[in-house]
Image (spheres, helix red, strand yellow):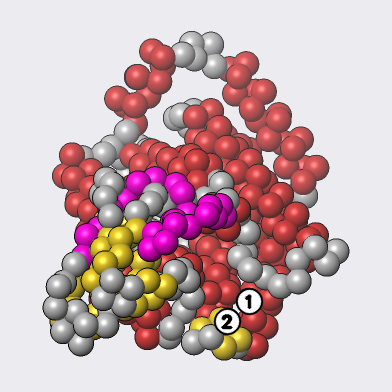
Amino acid sequence: MPRPEPMPGYGQLLQRCYRGLAGAVRSCTDCGWELSRRSWAENASLACSETLLCLLCAIGWTWLRRAASGCLFRPFGEWCNLQPKDAAKMPESAWKLLFYTLSWSYGAYLLFFTEYPFFHDPPSVFYGWEKGMDVPTDIGIAYLLQGSFYGHSIYATVYMDAWRRDSVVMLIHHVVTLTLIVFSYAFRFHNVGILVLFLHDISDVQLEFTKLNVYFKHRGGIYHRLNDVISNLGCLTFSISWFWFRLYWFPLKVLYATCHSSLQSVPDVPFYFFFNALLLALTLLNLYWFLYIVLFVAKVLTGQMQEVNDVREYDVEESKKTTGPQKAGELQLPKRWPVMARCADPHLGRAQTRCMRPSHGIEARSTGNGGTCGSELRGDPGEGQVMAKGRGWSKYGTSFSAVVSFTGTI
């Protein structure tokens, strides 16, 4: 096996990758749809049973997230008495932190505690490549977990996560990542895939951990300084790790190996342009988000922001707060899309009503001396109203008496 090649600089990366791409273009005399179809038929290896298993696992992730949010994360947020807007977003970050911590830890185990030399010697990802070669079980498990999770994440971004300014970009990221996972598995480029996933997951771990501390620094009506300090430190380490892992190591290890080193080991590597185009798109997405990070840090350093409120700082709920005049007994909810829940109990003496928006749903509960009623809707429940009999209050600040109804869109 050749000695590990020293990691190049940015200049060497650009020079050698350009040389490799230009040479591949000149040598590809019959590039086009016919060559792509023939390359897929000759080199791809993806069984229907493997695709079905990945789809079932994606459904399993969705079910597991709903169960964890309903039975663990959301009750814990209520027990900690988080602010309503933080309680609504906390389950999403807790779920992602749990997954990315486990996935990154497993990736670190594969790269640093086994015989795989891919991190220290990135060109080795293509040594001994053969079409249809067996995928090691430990790498196959990582691919199954990651592929199914990103399949789930496409659904979750649309129907479960809080909608943000960059959610469309996030969808593009998930589609690109899932495409890379599926095609790299089919063409047996799984070695480079493990390296790509490892270099990206660590930033998500720090992001979600920092956001959780942002949500927990105001709980029970009390400011908690420890969570504030951790969130500020987390913002700093997140910014550094994003640059170091995604904009330094990722291009100099992965792009160098796929653009330049791959042609040294496998001169006729299949789908060369396709894979490198997707990896370049991933790099551009990393640059796009890094711009937001730089702007965020600049606002903190120049005093435009006094504290870290959200690491990404562009939740729709935060950026589009609109409050209109309230009628007597009517609650105006932040506008986004229509929801409805109905909760009425004529036996309630003194009622306490809460309206919350846990991701894409609304939860309405009324409790009192005479009994309890509750309704929780998920997805796109349509439109309607929430009603409560008796006297009570809402966490949005509207007090009421007698029969109260409030309608709105969120």
Please say if the residues under marks 1 and 2 sit with CB atoms less than 8 Å apart. yes
Q: At x 34% / y 54%, what residue is drawn? A: 407
Q: Which residues are magenta?
A: 321-343
**Circle 1: residue type:** Ser
Residue neighbourhood size for the residue with mark 2, other residues' Cα within 10 Å, grouped as few (<14), some (14–19), many (≥20): many
Rendering coords of residue 326 (x, y %): 48, 57
Q: Is residue 342 magenta?
A: yes
**Circle 2: residue type:** Lys
Question: Residue 4 is drawn in which quadrant?
Answer: bottom right
- Residue at disc 2, secondary structure: loop
**How many numbered markers are drawn?**
2
Which label is found at residue 217?
A: 2
Left or right: residue 240 versus residue 99 is right
Spatial CA distance of label 1 from label 2 is: 9 Å
Residue neighbourhood size for the residue with mark 1, other residues' Cα within 10 Å, grouped as few (<14), some (14–19), many (≥20): many
Mark closest to the chain's N terminus, 1 or 2: 2
Which label is found at residue 384?
A: none
Relative to 9, does residue 331 appear above or below in the rendering?
Answer: below
Q: At x 28% / y 55%, what residue is drawn? A: 385
Q: Is residue 139 magenta?
A: no
Relative to 152, does residue 262 appear above or below in the rendering?
Answer: above
Q: At x 67% / y 70%, what residue is drawn? A: 308
Which label is found at residue 231?
A: 1
Q: At x 45% / y 43%, what residue is drawn? A: 171
Rendering coords of residue 106 (x, y %): 42, 69
Left or right: residue 390 versus residue 112 is left
Residue 214 visible, this angle? yes
